Image: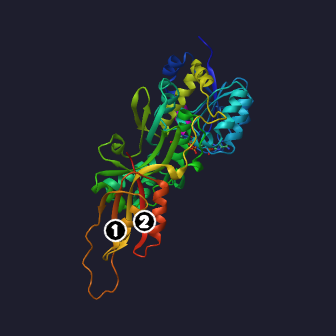
Amino acid sequence: MTSALQIGIIGLGNVGTGVAKILTQHPDRIRQRAGRPIEIRRAVVRDLHRSREIDLPQGVTTDRIESVIHDPQIQVAVELMGGIHPAKEVVLALLEAGKDVVTANKALLCEHGDEIFAAAKRFGRTVCFEAAVAGGIPIIAAVGQSMAANQIMGIQAILNGTTNYILSEMLFRGQSYDDALKDAQKLGYAEADPTLDVNGTDAAQKLGILAQLSFGTKVTASEFHVTGIDKLEQVDIKHAKDMGYVIKLLASVKLVDGKLEMSVRPTLIKNDRPLAQIHGPFNAILLEGDVVGNVWYSGRGAGQLPTASAVTADIIDLAIGRAQLTFAQLDLWRDTPEFPLIDGDAASSRYFLRLSVEDRPNVMAEVTGILGRHGISLATVIQPEAPEVDDESKAVPIVPLIIMTHRTTAGCLAAAERDLDRLGSVRSPRMVLAVAD
Ligand code: NAP
């Protein structure tokens, strides 16, 4: 029999433990699929005294990363420590030491993928990263291999399970954003510090990797429009529902006239669309290829075993030698982007506006007049009936005004918003959300 593939796992946390479980609990299945046994030679942790969910043989667990980097027996290193530093330095050292690397680290790849892939090429090594986007959903293989006959024309995706869970709770249980977030934390769907999930950064990093793979363009999360769900109110979910839409944190990139329109933002999606029906902590991705048309993927985008499933598949691909062949052909993080990003102001969409306006004559005309002057045409205008006012009160009541526009550019909308700000009859808060086609 062919000799075992010796691996080093750096990070025995949530995902690392899942990988160790799969490899130790299903050795026959793994040996059959990989063509040889896969053995964990080292597992690196920060704190050797912490109790672990898994018992590895004596001497395997260590707190010395060097014991993986400098071990000539280890051919594949699995980086599951997370974060950017020292993960970046560790991955570069592993590649230089002649190891192929598997990583689930989207933050690292989105920010420093160019350096890491250049180093891999320089040292003749391979980097696999199936688990870095959408956890257990095999989307990297889909874009990088299975859709190879296509030019990807667009991607629409729910890439963050935490925010999708929160939005589902707000929709079905009428919870406030804060209460839904607390529940997500209790159930382990949200971290104690959920900032990178709820502000859209996590989804933006994953979209950055998909854009790189699909369009050959390096885009970091700071280079395109990213808005989170943390300002959404229950009333937005309700107004959207009344109009036949659900709100999702939509990660979207599409090719328009040779340029990329890219965003991560809360978006109204017509409720009969498949993406609108993905609820709870699930992810889903719609790919549009110029040859195949639309292709769907959905499933668990995070969690111990779903993510470990993707990491283990990468290790098996390396054991077989398939990943090395594919990686050599993928022209990732090239110097010249194949398609540049569109200027943000030129990006177009339909929009949902929730304004807070004074309930007095002519306000509707003032607002619609401003939108009209900026060439924004209106599809729907709804002004819910105001409550009865106490005759004694001198205060002008403030009521919501809900507007759905036809397609316009972000630049026209921003100019109209500046004019609305100057109008005394329009007050805070204001909510502006994109509407998906
Ligand atoms: P985690 O539970 O925090 O585990 C991190 C592990 O790395 C721990 O075992 C920790 O050691 C070890 N570690 C951290 N810094 C280290 C250092 N400087 N030296 C040695 N060991 C170090 O993280 P995770 O949730 O498994 O995530 C791992 C990676 O997978 C991240 O890049 C994450 O973005 C990605 N990912 C995670 C999920 C998910 O569902 N969790 C999904 C997709 C992708 P100690 O245990 O001793 O602290």
Q: Residue at x 62, y 42 (%)?
A: 108
Q: Give the amino acid type for the residue marked by disc 2 in the picture.
A: Arg
Q: Position of residue 309 (x, y in %)?
A: 49, 31
Q: Residue at x 44, y 57 (%)?
A: 181
Q: Residue at x 73, y 27 (%)?
A: 122
Q: Earlier in the sequence, mark 2 or mark 1?
A: 1
Residue 66 is left or right of residue 309, and the answer is: right
- Is any atom of residue 53 visible in this view? no
* Residue 18 falls within the magenta-colored stretch: yes
Q: Give residue 430's mark.
A: 2
Q: Position of residue 78 (x, y in %)?
A: 62, 32
Assign a secondary structure to mark 2.
Answer: strand
Q: Nearer the viewer, residue 396 or 205?
A: 396
Q: Split into 4 quadrants, where in the image is the C terminus?
A: top left
Q: Is residue 345 above or below residue 153?
A: below
Question: For the residues marked 2 and 1, what is the alpha-carbon distance in whole angstroms?
Answer: 9 Å
Residue to which mark 1 is pinned: 400
Residue 351 is left or right of residue 93, and the answer is: left
Q: Give the amino acid type for the residue marked by disc 1 in the picture.
A: Pro
Q: Is residue 341 above or below residue 183?
A: above
* Residue 17 falls within the magenta-colored stretch: yes
- Neighbor class of circle 2 (other Cα within 10 Å; few <14, some 14-19, many 20+) is some
Q: Position of residue 56 (x, y in %)?
A: 59, 32
Q: Position of residue 33 (x, y in %)?
A: 50, 19
Q: Residue at x 50, y 17 (%)?
A: 32
Q: Magenta residues?
A: 15-19
Q: Nearer the viewer, residue 422 or 249?
A: 422
State yes or no: Cβ of the residue under disc 1 lies below 8 Å from any atom of ligand 1.
no
